[in-house]
Amino acid sequence: EMDVINAAQALALGVGVGYVTWRRATAVPKESGPKRIVVVGGVAGGASAAARCRRLDEFAHIIMFEKGPDPSFANCGMPYYLGGEIKDRNKLSVQTPDSLRKRLNLDVRVRCEVTSIDKVKMTVTARNLVTGEVCEERYDELILSVGAKPFVPAIPGLHRPGCMSLRNLEDMDEIEAWLTSRKAKSAVVAGGGYIGVEMAEQLLMRGLRVTLVEALPQLMAPFDPEMASMLTSELERHGVRVVLDRPIEGLEDSRSGAECGDVVLKGGERVCADMVILGLGVRADTDLARATGLALTAKGGIIVTPEMRTNVPHIWAVGDAVQVHNPIAGGDWMVALAGPANRQGRICADAICGRPRSYKGTFGSAAVRVFELTGACVGLNERALKASGKAYECVHLHPVSHAGYYPGAETLSLKLIFGTQGEDRGRVFGAQAVGKDGADKRIDVLATAIQGGMTVDDVCELELCYSPPVGSAKDPVNLAGMIAQNMLAGLIDTVQWRDLESLAADPSVAILDVRAASECSSLGLIHKDAINVPLDEIRSRMAEVPKDKKIITSCLSGQRAYFAARVLAQHGYSVSNLDGAFRTVVAAPGGSHVFAGPKVAPPAQQPQAVSASTNGGGSTTGKKSKK
């Protein structure tokens, strides 16, 4: 008997022609009776696969092994329990072993670790971590949902009590117990990704003095620097000290009696901490897969076909441990997100139960709340696009979240990235948004546009819901498409925020700020050498704009500068628009915090920050912090 997969899947796995046909000659003969499906690991991918298998096959014997006590839990909600926003711990247990048995007739075995897989006999060996009992179970189909584990670098001292990671509910309980028993007053969060930022927010809300340390020059790597900087400013505005571009070199005995110790940063600064949270990213937990002989990437991800098959017959893999297709740049990547893991589990179950479908890839849609702001993104950022070699442009805009005349409209900062050449011309590559209201909504729309293969022309024409309390007749998504459309049509040339200083230093360039004089007086010119001619006076004062120089127009958010650029271009000027204008420049790294808003008083129970030489107060991001 032979199982066959198509050549495209074989090529996707990179294993050559010999892989096209799978032989089962060495496998034990299948026993008669119901299909036996074994799932290793629960949570998003494994639990979804098991549940879907049951809905498609009422008679299958489905066994789920979970190393921890919780087969299905809301790991994304754990920071919010620690911060007190989620009051009831039980709400994080999405399903219990008992509920899965009763509702889905699953054989759930918690605190059981699968220690080995015999791919010839088609069996797994598992050990009960409580009793030590060892069992062997036969499978017809085996699904690996082994997930990812926190990355802990080889830095001296990270083994100390009070230095913890957050992967599961047991970790959460350990952190909660430490916070309570040690009456922690200070914390260092290592790593500025999603978990790190969420934990910094929640620990500060709980009343701790928090320092967030990131080895890279910015937080939130999926965002570009000028967008991530807005989230950094929001953390600082609420009292989190953010330290960028300074790796942790060690954790040592505290000189001031802190419970956990002193975190030693590059350069020698010591930050005292009653506790340290490690949020330094994750690595695929693929030791079992490697020992079984599954094909892995250089980074340790399990290679799978679009149906979630591995290179070993009847073994499938889903979730954070698998490498998936990157549908935007091509090739493959690893993305640890709950939504994709759930969909992979469903697709895997469909294939097992005779309803094959293909996973189209992961687009990277994600969001994070940072106090009063939400940051959301999808697709590729500029760094990834440069690495891919694709030609692209981007637009920044700062519209309001709904009709400006209706109360409560909030500024929304939106970035759209699109292709400029060949078959990618006009194709949406990625988008990022930051704001108090509507950021996630706009990224959801643009994520749909990307997955639908839409161009910026299509985005212009999207018909979206409008009512003054919830939107605008020209939605920010439409506006982003229109700006990109104008750029591709040659109606406007743009320059980026990072180029402003070099352009201003060029004697052949003049910077033209077209805001009202009162705006420039209160907020300052876009550059000290800029010329101020308000848009409404541009025609009558055109003689003040030098025609022998390249003109860079700017305003508050870009719209008036575009209008001025169109006027000047049609009068024979060489002109470009500063994309995103003043609001993008001041929000970007090195900006002056004009756009950040007023300083927020820290929680009443939070101690006053001490000097930066011991444990923070103010920022070390290179920006001026408002007091």
Image: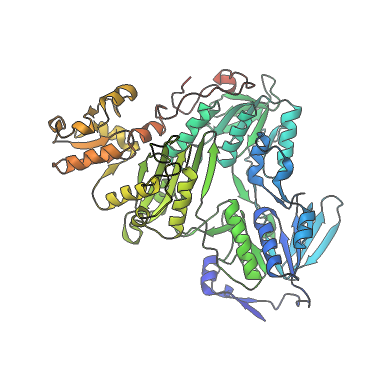
Task: Describe residue 617's horizontal placement relative to residue 290 as left or right.
Answer: left
Residue 506 seen by the camera: no
Task: Describe residue 553's horizontal placement relative to residue 28 as left or right.
Answer: left
Q: Of residues 69 and 83, which is closer to you in this image?
A: 83
Can you give x and y, in whole percent of width and height, for residue 243 in the image?
52, 29
Residue 472 seen by the camera: yes
Residue under the point 26% across and 37% down: 561
Can you give x and y, in whole percent of width and height, for residue 368 in the image?
54, 41
- Which quarter shows the N terminus? bottom right
How are the colours assigned in the image?
Answer: rainbow
Task: Describe residue 148's horizontal placement relative to residue 527 as left or right.
Answer: right
Can you give x and y, in whole percent of width and height, for residue 380 in the image?
45, 50
Work out whether 504 lies above or below 429. above
Q: Of residues 352 and 276, which is closer to you in this image?
A: 352
Q: Of residues 348 and 518, which is closer to you in this image?
A: 518
Work out whether 282 lies above or below 596. below
Task: Describe residue 310's horizontal placement relative to residue 223 as left or right.
Answer: right
Tally the marks. 0
Can you give x and y, in whole percent of width and height, for residue 481 in the image?
35, 50
